[in-house]
Amino acid sequence: MSADRWTISTQLDVSYEIRETPSLLDLDNPTLADVLTSDSQGGTKLVIVDRAVARLYGARLERYLKEYNVPHRLLELLGDEGRKTMGQVLQVISALNEVGTLRASDAPVAIGGGVVLDVVGLAASLYRRGIPHTRVPTTLLSLVDVSVAAKTGVNFQGFRNRIGSYSPPPLTLVDPAFLSTVSTRQISNGGGEIFKMGLIKDPALFALLENGGPALVANKFQSPEGAEAIRRAIAGMIDELRNNLWEKDLRRAVDYGHSFSPLVEMRHVQQLLHGGAVALDCLLSAFIAHGRGYLNHHEVDRIAATATGLGLPTWHPGFADIDLLMQALADTMRHRNGNQNLPVVESIGHATFLNDVSAEEIADAAHRMKRLGEHQESELVRRGTNR
Ligand SMILES: NC(=O)c1ccc[n+]([C@@H]2O[C@H](COP(=O)([O-])OP(=O)(O)OC[C@H]3O[C@@H](n4cnc5c(N)ncnc54)[C@H](O)[C@@H]3O)[C@@H](O)[C@H]2O)c1
Ligand SMILES: [Zn+2]
């Protein structure tokens, strides 16, 4: 008797929207209320808010929801990388159950930085095997990067985003005014992803950062140049993801700065923010590119100076730990299905990929990066004593 065999093949259309919405919590801006009520069957909405955001904007948010008669329950979650845990995911799932969230209507809303958005995104993708939600990013990093992302995730056993899913929410509402309360350190952190985007695909964006980095950080991207940098970063990210949303192609230019940094960041999670770790990886990779004859000395110096202007680190001992760098690359290669696919900048604003980078090249690049760090430090000391 011959065995039967069945196959099922189907396609899933996916589309989602990222919409700029200035003054999101102003009572005369109905956008959020429209979103909350358009799919409503009168149930309670779960509104998940980053605790820091709740402290700063909680009263305004409550007033807004009351004004528009939105039945809701607030759930506060914690931001910061160490809180990107399954524990917080389960907290969201419990709350969804408690308020009786429906399969498709009365979708929850997440308001916060990348950690809260990734945690809620994962919870929403698991609850009833996937429900919609709306996301509102409130940090620079989440505005320019997470707002476009299809991915969710939490950290696990010391590895970044080891558990996660691909499930973009239908709508993300972007209001850069939230940045006015974000700390300068966190603004620089978000600057790390914008810096990456300029380096791999947008020379004009890089020029904005190179010429005006300190001012952008000082006024928290609230100037016209800041708005342009945010728009260019979002548009660049969309352009890169659009044709490779499910990452079937594991050669991704947007992975620039994300090859060595994930493990170094997790090992030094108390000192390094994600964007800082990304900037350090960008610089290490720039030294690797320099060794290959892509970037000249002057360009590497400009890259480092631009990072410094944005308040990003150009040196950290984690990037002198060659064993750690090699372990990081090995784990990244598993993520890239066995290949290095190492994005490097061949000239500012243009990326290419390497697949044959040797341990010696990495050690040499790390050594040069350390020398630059030491040089910058001695310059600072010299200027300090001259003052
Ligand atoms: N899903 C994706 O594809 C994707 C893409 C990029 C980054 N990420 C993830 O994003 C995370 C980093 O996000 P992040 O940089 O926003 O960090 P974060 O969420 O930890 O936020 C940083 C800090 O700012 C606080 N905060 C948030 N909004 C604020 C506001 N308006 N005013 C004052 N304080 C505020 C938070 O409570 C937190 O303490 C990482 O875990 C990273 O993996 C995900
Ligand atoms: Zn990143």
Image: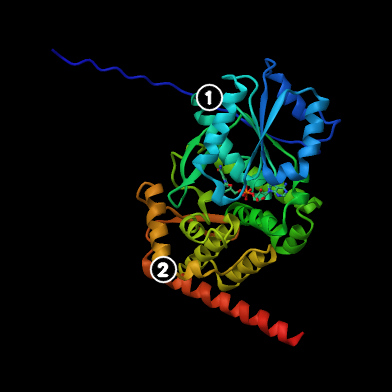
Dot 2 alpha-carbon crowd within 10 angstroms: few under 14, some 14 to 19, many 20 or more: some
Residue at label 2? 322
Which residue lies at the image location 45% right of the left edge and 52% below the top edge?
Answer: 158
**Ligand 2 closer than 8 Å to the CB at disc 2?**
no
Residue 54: image location, x then y, percent: 72, 41
Q: Residue at horizontal 79%, vertical 57%?
A: 219
Q: Which mark is residue 13?
A: 1
User: Does residue 169 sit above or below 163 in this rendering?
Assistant: above
Query: Image quadrant of residue 163?
Result: top left
Instruction: Report the residue that reaches farthest toward the bottom.
Output: 386
Front one among 173 and 86: 86
Relative to residue 63, is residue 79 drawn left or right? left
Secondary structure category for the residue under label 2: helix
Up-down relation of residue 3 to residue 361 (above or below): above
Q: Viewer-proximal residue, 116 or 323?
A: 116
Q: Residue at x 48, y 60 (%)?
A: 267
Q: Is residue 30 visible?
A: yes
Label 1: state its secondary structure: loop
Which residue is at a point 77% across and 41% down the rendered structure image?
57
Residue 294 seen by the camera: no
Residue type of the residue flagged with mark 2: Ile
Which amino acid is tagged 1? Asp
From the top left corner, tell me how far across and down residue 161 is, in percent: 48, 45
Give the Cα separation between the discs numbered 1 and 2: 44 Å
Q: Position of residue 149 (x, y in %)?
A: 58, 40
Question: Given contact means CB atoms under 8 Å apart, are the residues at marks 1 and 2 in contact?
Answer: no
